[in-house]
Amino acid sequence: MISLGGYLIGILLICAQKPEIRAVERALPKATPGWMTSKLSTTTIEILLGTDSPVHFHPAKIVHSIATKEQFQNGLVPDDFEMGTLVGLFDVHRTIFDYRNLEVPAGLYAVRIAHQPDSDDHRDTAPGRMFFLLCPLDKESPIPPKKLDDLLKRAIIGNRKHASPWFGFVSKEKASIPLPTLRESPPKHQSILWKQIVEMESGSGETVLGLTWKGPE
């Protein structure tokens, strides 16, 4: 029988490991709602900590952007994506810890874009204003929440008072590099980069999105 102390030491060792990622073909979880399955890729990003695989991330096949063709050519920025935009599904197999080091229990979560308010209360709390929020599937709907307050309500997990934030950004890396990959970007952050097809009114193209797995100590 494993003691509580031994269990906690094991968890700490897992959390201290640098993650590795790889792209694998994997069917979507059976509990994924029908309206969502057509939007998600079966080429998943598997996050590995040693031999442990706590998360599979199924990116969206296409992410909608409000950018113009000229804006896309100049390089997308976070505000080119609307609040609540679906970017994927997190299949969490065991408890993990988010950007604020708060627990996220095993389960299925839609991953949606949020923009941090531009206020003194939030300034300099992260490298940028863009975040991905995990929304439990039992609160999900095909209609994306357009307002931050509505998105935050949808993103409440269990009895937590706050949503689960994961810092996100549009990477300056070119889509031609081998992806997905792990980068120290921004500095002192461990981030997952992946190639994302973006759809706009003027057409479509590819960009690189980043999701921070772990922030600075």
Image (cartoon, helix red, strand yellow):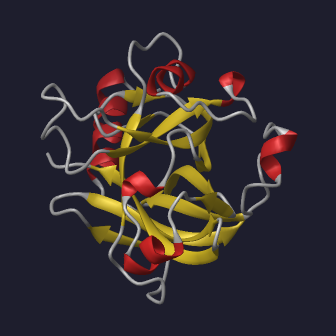
Looking at this rendering, what residue extends furthest in the right direction? 34
Q: In which quarter of the image is residue 45?
A: bottom right
Residue 194's x, y, as percent? 49, 70
In the displayed structure image, the side of residue 184 where residue 41 appears, left or right: right
Which quarter of the figure is the C terminus placed in? top left
Can residue 18 be seen here? The reply is: no
208, above or below 8, in the image: below
* Rendered image quadrant of residue 50: bottom left
**Residue 38 in picture, x, y percent from top left:** 82, 54
Q: Residue 171: image x %, image y %?
A: 35, 69
Which of 126 and 67 lies nearest the eye of the viewer?
67
Q: In this view, does 24 lie above or below 57?
A: below
The residue under the point 47% across, 23% down is 152
Q: Which residue shows up at 29% across the image and 26% down it?
A: 5
Q: Quadrant of residue 209?
A: bottom left
Residue 83 point in image, percent of width and height: 50, 40
> Looking at the image, which is closer to me, 12 or 137?
137
Q: In this view, does 186 lie to the left or right of 85?
A: left
